[in-house]
Amino acid sequence: MFGISPRAALAFPPVIRDNEAWNAVPSAEAYMRFFYCLPLCLALAAAPAAVAQNLGGRGQSANWITAPDTPAREFGVYHFRRGFDLPAKPATFVIRVTADNRYKLYVNGQLASLGPARGDVLNWRYETVDIARYLKAGRNVLAAVVWNFADQRPLAQISLRTGFLVQGETQAERVADTGANWKAMRNLAYRPIPFPRGFQYGYYVVGPGEHVEAGAYPWGWEQPDFDDSAWKPAVSIGRPALREDASGEDWWLAPRSIPMMELTPERVGVVRRSSGVEPPAAFPAQPAAFPIPVHTKAVILIDRTHLTTAYPELVVSGGKGALVTLRYSEVLRFPGKKDPGNRNEIEGRRSEGNYDEFVADGGARRFYSTLWWRTWRYLEVSVDVKDEPLVIEDLRSVYTGYPFERKARFDSDSPELATMLDIGWRTARLCAHETYVDCPYYEQLQYIGDTRVQALISLFNTGDARLMRNAIELVDGTRTGDMITLSRAPSWVPQYIPGFSLMWIGMVHDYWMYRDDPDFVRRMLPGVRSILAWFARLQKPSGSLNAVPFWDIVDNLERRMRLGQEEPGWAPIDLNLLLAYQWAADLEDGVGYKGLAQEYRGEAARMKTAMAALYLDPSRKLFADTPDKKTFSQPTNVMAILAGLVAPAEARAWIDRTIDDPAVNKSGLYFRYYLHLAANVAGAGDRFVDLLEPWRGMLGRGLTTWSEFDSSDSRSDCHAWSASPNVEIFRTILGVDSAAPGFKRVIVRPFLGKLTRASGAVPHPQGEIAVSLALRNGKLEAEVNLPPGIGGDFVWKGESRPLRPGPNKLTY
């Protein structure tokens, strides 16, 4: 059973932005066989949003199918087709579709759906689509490509076996159901290209490149008039079942809970250097065909001028046997050196990224694009032409990512802050797809620590909480038995970072504070309780933790202890647990059991006493990392401030020592989010702009997104945990934050620091919070506009005044 009712389709349209260069492409080419087409967007945009699940499921006729003689778990690319006749063009025609690993579904040659959204076997996502606009009276053809990267698939891609499924919603649409009436074939043009380890600067798990032989490709397979007479009937491999009905079935199906990804056509950049050929001056800013002569090896280096996540699109003619290689790099590197220096410079540097290969077959206007998107700033095109000249007709790309819409605004007398916001926004966008990803180039994994920061960036900049909610659910689903969560989800290789499980509780708390969704938060409480119960077994009578299994790391601090080894104590994980007890107490008090809230608060109070006794150095007025008080760090003292171990009257001096003492180990870019938050809480938000030196350093190194670490040789040039200033510019400078669960009250507590004016807006579930601040003649003039029904407080230098819904004017 795979049904939902009533007749409904998810309103999850991909967003295609306007683009002059793209619009200049001839229409016959713009709507070629690939799937980036305006009709898809219009169809999904028009689909109604309501979804109701039919849990009965009797009489369903669809089956999971695969191609005959197909290895269940080996690399392969497969095509499926189904032709049927309709007496008239239908007003609606709703189907549900999914596949393992992934699919693209075409209707009469036009893409109708792509997915499925990433999940796990117990929450295998399907898309619901009304394909009526693509249908016509008479003959119609559904066609799909399904691929399985098997053991070379991205680490975030869960898989059981190769499979494809379509089910019509009612009897009228059952003609689309997958079964033996579908035809199938294996596309032998593809083979995977593992990324060479010699070019990997650290952990790399995003899947293989593609080698495609055009001579073996079934060109036109998705078009209605394609001859599929040689294809064999598809093989049924099992009945579908919704998660609520599953009992032994392979995939437990659940509806897609996030929008379709944005698909925005874009040009690929500017030529920075070339050899073996001189491209036209117009290339690649606009289509400009040019030949590459026989027996020529040519290399063209294209600079996008900023990082992107996109599907490359190559169009070539002729050149039978010519090999075209597309290599993708975040940055160009000196041979044999890790540090690339300034990202804008190319002299003496080379491209060392992952790559795809396309071997031409001599045909006209052959179109190639990758099955999965790529990440690059620099795109190197290498061409090895054999006995027939190759014509490069066009090279372009289509940006893809979660369709966030930037709603926050900010203006001030610092142009630098506006630049940082723009770069942070790009960083956050490139790290948000069907899940949040830590970095788009190397991993594409949704780690809890990264994701908590990313989700808050989303809330403050867009107000869209759907990807955040999806992340919380996916992580919650990784708990087994009485275990904590995995550190990341989805992932087919398990990894545990216990501190990240505690941060997941913080994510749930964030969601509770910024979204009025108590039922969802209540559903997460069993996971919160399970995690704290797991940690409770490791606590000593004093409240501090014994050695913690798995990877015990907090920011750039790491403890390596063996279980059973004498453990004096480690403040970073102890304080993380203390914070989690406090978050959990708030959640239980708000939507759970008040008795359990009282228990958690009691445990937190006991831990606070223990933490002060174990780690406080009264002479230095700082908390140490260990009871021997030999090392001190910003993460430890930041968490101590956030957990309330430092009295409010002492907090400002405490954060100043934490920041300024050279003997205190500094936070990494990840934990800078918490450092900035602690400065705000301690009343030192006026220091925030000065604390942005690492970001100024990245600007000076030519980065167009924020890097993973504060160093020139950072592995990843795009890591969303480093975009946290896109929270604090609004929460600290403008001072806007939630003051009650569900954002039902607002606090505006600005810190202008050296600025004399700042204004902007932050999205709110009921509208937006607009703030304007100006210092004139030593006085603050403030205007605050709150959404209807939302009140709050304005605080300036310790003096609080009430805010009412609508416009407010204040002078201090």
Image (cartoon, rainbow, N blue to C red):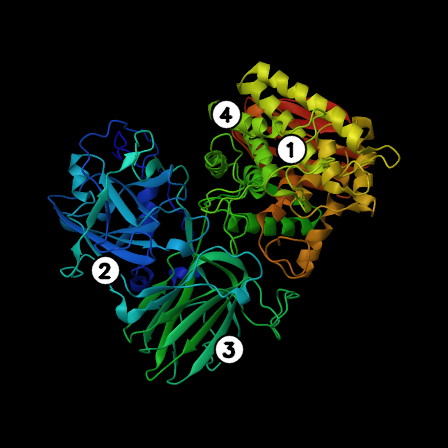
Q: Say what amino acid the circle numbered 3 marks.
A: Ser
Q: What secondary structure is marked by label 1?
A: strand
In percent of width and height, residue 516 lies at: 51, 25
Q: Say what amino acid the circle numbered 2 marks.
A: Trp
Q: Is residue 811 visible?
A: no
Which residue matches tag 1?
736
Q: What secondary structure is marked by label 4?
A: helix
Q: Say what amino acid the circle numbered 4 marks.
A: Pro
Q: What secondary structure is marked by label 3?
A: strand
Which residue matches tag 3?
274
Q: Report if the CB atoms under discs 1 and 2 are less than 8 Å apart.
A: no
- Return the residue found at the far top: 595
Query: Is 635 displayed left or right of 222 in the figure?
Result: right
- Return the residue found at the far right: 619
Number of numbered markers? 4
Q: CA distance from mark 3 to mark 2?
A: 35 Å
Circle 4 packing at 10 Å, graded few (<14), some (14-19), many (20+), is few
Q: What secondary structure is marked by label 2?
A: loop
